[in-house]
Amino acid sequence: MSQRQTNIFLSGLTVCLVLYLSDQPPGWTDTAHPPAELEHLLPHLRSTLKMPLSRDIVLQWQEEGGEPRYFPESRRILFCGDFVRQLEELLARNRSWLAESERLDVRDRFLRFSLLHEVAHVLIGDRNSPPGEDEESAADGLAVWLALKGLTDGEAVVAGAVELFSLPGLTPVSTHSSPVERASRLACLLQGFQGSSTICRPAFQELDRLWRGLAASEVQE
């Protein structure tokens, strides 16, 4: 099988975009360049992570396959075109008054949060932590922490995730809490970070305590 592989060195982290150009298995794109959605995400991955992980991550694009997900055996993060299209259709139905460029901005902020969520799975797996919490909830929390601590527009990224998770019609995933529950938790963590909610402030402080010693070396301070 022939393939084109592009290695992009991101401050010590190598992201390999594997794009099959011929004899590709069913469903794999024959695009010669990374899809725009992935190109938008890569600079934010670079700005958030600074030290090498235990091994490289493979970031792949597939036209069909649903939600982004992480395969620990191959250290592969998969993004799919049908998921991006689902987001666009969801926004068109529920945010029709927004200009298309504004809807795409919300979509891209959500995709960036989704990438941080999958990278969080990598970090959690590499460190066999944290104990006492299901991994999907832990990955959501670490994604929030990485966004707020590592991105200049991290608050907008988390807010984009809250907005998408709050919309009716987003397909729930069996391994996650419901989208509404995820939106509520992310909103509380964001408000706790901003100091706009005394009720939510302890939740963010606990998140910061949990990850500061564990993942601070991964964040550009």
Image: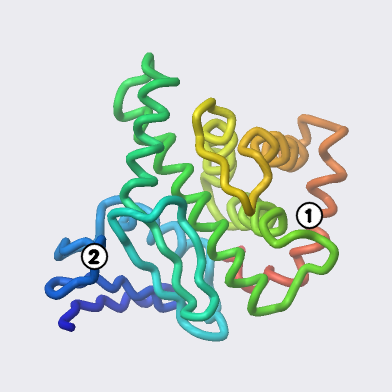
Amino acid of disc 2: Pro
Using a 10 Å C-alpha cutoff, classify the residue at mark 2 as few (fewer than 14 neighbours), some (14 to 19) or many (20 or more): few
Quadrant location, the C terminus: bottom right
> On the rendered structure, is 30 left or right of 65?
left
SS at circle 1:
helix
Q: Residue at x 39, y 68 (%)?
A: 59
SS at circle 2:
loop
Image location of residue 130, percent across then percent down: 78, 68
> On the rendered structure, is 175 left or right of 2?
right
- The residues tagged by marks 1 and 2 sit, at their Cα atoms, a distance apart of 41 Å
Location of residue 21 by image quarter:
bottom left
Q: Which mark is residue 207?
A: 1
Amino acid of disc 1: Leu
Q: Mark 2 highlights which residue?
A: 26
Q: Which mark is residue 102?
A: none
Q: Is residue 7 above or below residue 191?
A: below
Lower sequence index among marks 1 and 2: 2
> On the rendered structure, is 148 left or right of 200?
left
Q: Is residue 67 above or below residue 198?
A: below
Using a 10 Å C-alpha cutoff, classify the residue at mark 1 as few (fewer than 14 neighbours), some (14 to 19) or many (20 or more): some
The residue closer to the viewer here, 5 or 145, is 5
